[in-house]
Image (cartoon, rainbow, N blue to C red):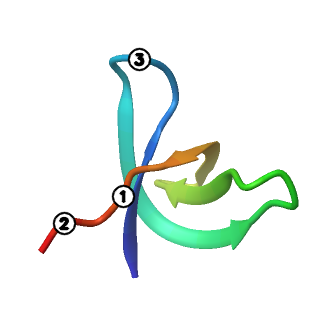
Amino acid sequence: MLRTIALGTSILVQGIYVRTLPDGRMTVRVDGSTYSGIPVSRTA
């Protein structure tokens, strides 16, 4: 499942969901690299 996370105030990364960390951040995988950041809320 594709998910979007924010790495800073202006950097967003979209990738395959890996896991949610205990502090609320989410990890996604993009081309073999993993990134952790704050999940972006979904809209309808």
Q: Contact (CB < 8 A) between labels 1 and 3?
A: no
Q: Contact (CB < 8 A) between labels 1 and 2?
A: yes
Secondary structure beneath label 3: loop
Mark earlier in primary sequence (1, 3): 3
Secondary structure beneath label 1: loop
In the current view of this chain or complex, which residue is farthest to the top? 9
- 3D distance between C-alphas at marks 1 and 2: 7 Å
Relative height, residue 5 to residue 43 (above, below): above
Mark earlier in primary sequence (2, 3): 3
Picture coordinates of residue 40, whole percent (x, y): 39, 51
Image point 69% across, 51% down: which residue?
Answer: 25
Give the residue at mark 1. Answer: 41
Locate residue 27: give its quadrant. Answer: bottom right
In the current view of this chain or complex, which residue is farthest to the bottom? 1
The amino acid beneath tag 3 is Thr
The amino acid beneath tag 1 is Ser
Image point 36% across, 58% down: which residue?
Answer: 41
The amino acid beneath tag 2 is Thr
Image point 33% across, 18% down: which residue?
Answer: 10
Picture coordinates of residue 21, whole percent (x, y): 80, 60
Relative height, residue 23 to residue 11 (above, below): below
Image point 28% across, 66% down: which residue?
Answer: 42
Relative height, residue 30 to residue 16 (above, below): above
Give the residue at mark 2. Answer: 43
Give the residue at mark 3. Answer: 9
Picture coordinates of residue 36, whole percent (x, y): 65, 44
Secondary structure beneath label 2: loop
